[in-house]
Amino acid sequence: MKAGTEPDLAAPEYRETSLEGVDHIEFFVGNARQAAHFYRTAFGFDVVAYQGPETGVRDRASYALRQGDVTLVMTAPLTPDGEIADHVRLHGDGVRTLAFTVDDAFAAFQDAVSRGARPVAEPHVLEDQRGAVRLATVRTFGDTVHTFVERAEYGGSFLPGYRDEFKGGAGAGLRLVDHCVCNVELTRMDEWVSWYNRVFGFDVFQEFDESDIATQYSALRSKVVRGGREGRVTFPINEPAKGLRKSQIDEYLDYYHGPGVQHIALQSEDIVESVDWLRRQGAEFLRAPDSYYESLPERVGPIDEDMQRLRELNILVDRDEHGYLLQIFTRPVEDRPTLFFEVIQRKGCRGFGKGNFQALFQAIEREQEARGNL
């Protein structure tokens, strides 16, 4: 079967297909080579695969990067027209695809569409000498899409059509995608929460309102949806709430020109080592006020890490009834104040750092004020 053709298979009987987890996250960017270099040097990702003119692809260049179980793909247009160029022109560099690993892409697509998802790409097969991958895509919030990836019969480093290559990035100890935060317009949060429940069976895991996430100036609402096999896929969905000034969600929506992925949280097995390495490589992080650490021991109780070291690196700590977590947030990684990353380590805690919301929001608002957008 040729790449991109419809599979010559009869439709299976209807069944629910469990999402195995996040397969990869694809960004549409202005310059894929430069973006790949940035994530390799500043974040420690390995470049593992490439497609472009040298592989017979004429309209784009893509670099697949990997660290632990995290795969990021940087894709740039080679022409001024088409969906990639249009996406970059409107949004700047941003996440286009949140892809899921599934055991049956055809069934996953049929299931999602039958439950109300809008199709983008019908199930199709890509193959080369290393095997075959089945793919299908549906639309979600804004210009973001979900692609189902069935790769059990493929032995290459990423997808058919990519050539394997390796440019080591040293590694920062990042091992998997913890969650992806999605920003949507005012009054649209519940609509998308219901969509994920209806289409994928996701449940609301936690929710926050103005009493949880607010400062003197701004606020937001958030509901965390979770699903897939063993709850491996987690999406907090945010919307702005009314405040005295423009919230970070409003600023994101203004600069991104619509809803999209605001930040990606990556788990580390040793956040102290990871953040120390990232800082030395030039990654820039938001800074909590020094007063945050004065009450930290009393608020979170005993922890394994050295408090002074956490203060030096500006790592935040929070606790729930199951344990504690450590987290830190980068500054936006692009000129537009849109996408940023979180590094998180969980020691039993299942939450998202509710006790850190105040310090985080104040740090973000200092950045907004410097940009003249608060």
Image (cartoon, rainbow, N blue to C red):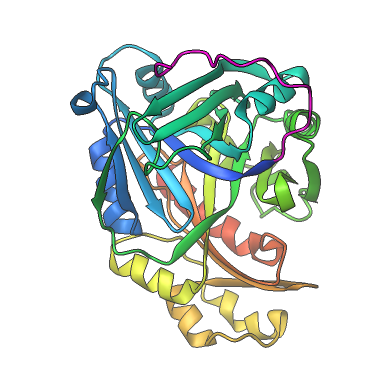
Tell me the quarter of the image containing the N terminus: top left
Number of dots carrying numbers? 0
Identified at 49% across, 41% down, the residue is 24
In the displayed structure image, the side of residue 47 where residue 227 appears, left or right:
right
Per the rendered image, the range of residues in magenta is: 1-18
Res 148 → quadrant: top right
Identified at 42% across, 75% down, the residue is 273
Identified at 26% across, 33% down, the residue is 31
Identified at 37% across, 41% down, the residue is 156
Task: State whether residue 3 is above or below residue 185.
Answer: above
Residue 340 magenta: no
Res 283 → quadrant: bottom left
Provide residue 28's location: percent of width, then percent of height. 39, 30
Provide residue 3's location: percent of width, then percent of height. 40, 19
Provide residue 136's location: percent of width, then percent of height. 56, 23
Q: Nearer the viewer, residue 233 or 166?
A: 166
